[in-house]
Image: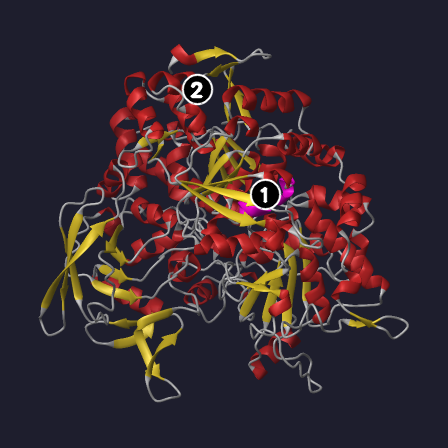
Amino acid sequence: MNTQFRKPLPGSSLDFFDTQAAVDAISPGAYSKLPYCSRVYAENLVRRCEPAKLTDSLKQIIERKQDLDFPWYPARVVCHDILGQTALVDLAGLRDAIAEKGGDPSKVNPVVPTQLIVDHSLAVEHAGFEKDAFEKNRAIEDRRNDDRFHFINWTKTAFKNIDVIQPGNGIMHQINLEKMSPVVQSRDGVAFPDTLVGTDSHTPHVDALGVIAIGVGGLEAESVMLGRPSYMRVPDIVGVELVGKRQSGITATDIVLAITEFLRGEKVVSTYLEFFGEGARALTLGDRATISNMTPEFGATAAMFYIDEMTIDYLKLTGRDDSQVKLVENYAKQAGLWADTLENVEYERVLRFDLSSVGRNIAGPSNPHKRVSTSELAAAGITGKVEQDGKLMPDGACIIAAITSCTNTSNPRNVIAAGLIARNANAKGLTRKPWVKTSLAPGSKAVQLYLEDAKLLSELEQLGFGIVGFACTTCNGMSGALDPVIQQEVIDRDLYTTAVLSGNRNFDGRIHPYAKQAFLASPPLVVAYAIAGTIRFDIEKDVLGKDSQGNDVTLKDIWPSDEEIDAVIAQSVKPEQFRKVYEPMFDIKVEYGSDNDPQYEWRPQSTYIRRPPYWEGALAGERTMKGMRPLAVLGDNITTDHLSPSNAIMLESAAGAYLDKMGLPEVDFNSYATHRGDHLTTQRATFANPKLFNEMVTQLGKNGKAEVKQGSYARIEPEGLESRMWEAIETYMERKQPLIIIAGADYGQGSSRDWAAKGVRLAGVEVIVAEGFERIHRTNLVGMGVLPVEFTSGENRHTYGIDGSETYDVIGQRMPGAALTLIITRKNGDQVEVPVKCRLDTAEEVSIYEAGGILQRFAQDFLDSNVN
């Protein structure tokens, strides 16, 4: 700790580290030009960096050098139950490995405060039009997840520094925004900025509060938990100036879908965004959070807003203690994190977005950045003639309409707008179509309280949008089963069916196995589509129904005014509602070591929790990177949903067959996500997405030409035998055949899913060669000991005519950014040498990779320093 810059914080009993003094001592006047994120990272260095290294590390930030690593120590780790549980399963397995080597397992604990919120396990088996849907869904959640919840409850007292928020309380990001983040921390008499990593790609949600919050994979989160710094390089920080004023009737969802399209086009992948300008200052905190939540859909790492009056108003609204609110304002002004102190910031690049240009939007199909104006649905080919022909439902039917996800339920304006449009629709006698499975799944119990106060919850319930849970649900693919009659008609008629949700992801195959495509929309539009019942509907022009006088009713007849929305919020959203929800939730004390043995007693028949294998067998062996055969040859935009899906497990899948063999009833197969604590179930999910296109597997198309076959397929070589993906993986595992994956651009987009890396490693994949990698997935690959390698000079799989019949070697020294050689040996024996780039980006990553992965590195370091 650099006590030289520790000073009393004026107007407070706390100290702070005067980062401006430290920076300006090196380069006078430099602090005033630093972006917000640079100031926060500089403070972290001043407070935590070794004194001898401080000057050089600060120079990296001042001079924006990106060729060296610097350490970042986040203040806390936030996890949802899927990746959080998986991380803790790994730590429990690490305890066993340490004990077997003679170490003390009780010494393996998170060093950094870790908050785990159980929010990814509830499926909407009972829809919002059913009585007591919430209670019924919760009962099913508890029954299905008994093994998981038993383990999670063990962790509460078995590990130090773990807080667990039990199921049924909300979504991690919304709880983080409304309660968990103090914005400014105070520990050991020192005030400093709150920062965190979270095991979900939408962790940047809380960037809206001015809190640097980075989504990471479970493996990187484990590293931070155990007190290791997150090594990073000075990021590209892009200023985004928001100008103009939103049009009347336009929601924050409309704005964020337009911004997502805009920023994707501006190539902001892996950058840190800082929103500023008069447009930004006019946005409520809820609106800002809607934008920050979509950070991974921009391709960015963070989406920050400065601390200002809107921040303070929000902290008061959500019931924070007065003393904490005063600390935030005082510290931000003293430390140069208040908006008025950032007027001279210099960005390498500034983008400008005009809020007044935004109209009503939806996004889809299949991509969050594929924006479509609702005034141009016909031109986009989305609308069409709706023909039911006496059938139960039309082609293009919306089988799911869900108000879900922290993206939108963190924003009272969006939720109140949905309630008002429901009220107006009810008054006109409109109803949802009977084939639409409707649901409301807020991210916070406070939403229920203010909807009840505004007398709008009953209006939503009347249209079928009753509360089904306080959890992720549909947005995470936990949409639950369809009515069997509806499902059978979808199958029998091969209907084009869709989902409309107020979430943040709509990738193919994610939302529901029988929803062929999905569209993102604001909560009030979700209500409107439930009434329309089909995506073929021109939502701005077509008639939703008739009122009691026989008059046509269209969207404009039921859309609420901005003034009415704001009036309801002013009257019905209150600090005491947030206090009522959160005070009891966070007033539960548990005592470390009070009940539990430091080693978990694994349940041998569990398909949810199983001792991990990462210190055993092939995973503990050397990776030769010789004679590798391709498991898959893939195109661009492969997502973690392709690599390891999270949605419901079907009986005909490899995982379904395994669960059936284990005696689990099909009704309780649950989702892939919930089984990620058991590698025997989850490794069978590798490339299990039915929307996968593995270019090694082709078929004759209708035009008589070969086309890539869609589905979870592979080709076993050298036989050239087509098979199911899991059959190929099993075959190669038996042969102990090292594998490689060849892919296109943006490999690993989507959720920060460590099993997308664990699955391929367990299959025997040693190297992945792609045109480019998504940030979080690349770090997860390194964390599992898989080498990420990039084509160079614009080359790709087509350049070399790769068809999957080849074998591959990788040679060269594995160092950050090093030039390696990929040797391709064709079936006829011909060889070609391809220059490729090593994507181990830091010395720390090289160290982790050489150890075989992050867990192996933990074990080595722990035993070196702690063995008895």
User: Could you tell me residue 598's position as x and y percent?
Assistant: 43, 32
Quadrant placement of the N terminus: top left
Quadrant placement of the C terminus: top left
Which residue position holds label 2? 20
| Rendered residue at 62%/52% (across/down) | 356
Q: What element carries label 2?
A: helix
User: Could you tell me residue 416's position as x and y percent?
Assistant: 74, 50
- Main SS, magenta region, reads helix
> Which segment did they paint magenta?
284-293
- What residue occupies the far right of the structure in this picture? 549
Q: Is mark 1 on a helix, strand or loop?
A: helix
Note whether 734 is above or below 609 in the view shown. Answer: below
Q: Within the magenta stretch, is there residue 225?
A: no
User: Could you tell me residue 594's position as x and y percent?
Assistant: 53, 27
| Rendered residue at 71%/86% (across/down) | 390
> For residue 709, what is the image quadrant?
bottom left
Which residue position holds label 1? 289
Q: Residues within 10 Å of mark 2 (few under 14, many from 20)?
A: many
Query: Left or right: 170 with respect to 224?
Result: right
Q: What residue type is labelled 1?
A: Ala
Q: Can residue 166 be seen in this view?
A: no
Q: Specify which label sits upstream in the sequence, 2 or 1.
A: 2
Q: What residue type is labelled 2?
A: Gln
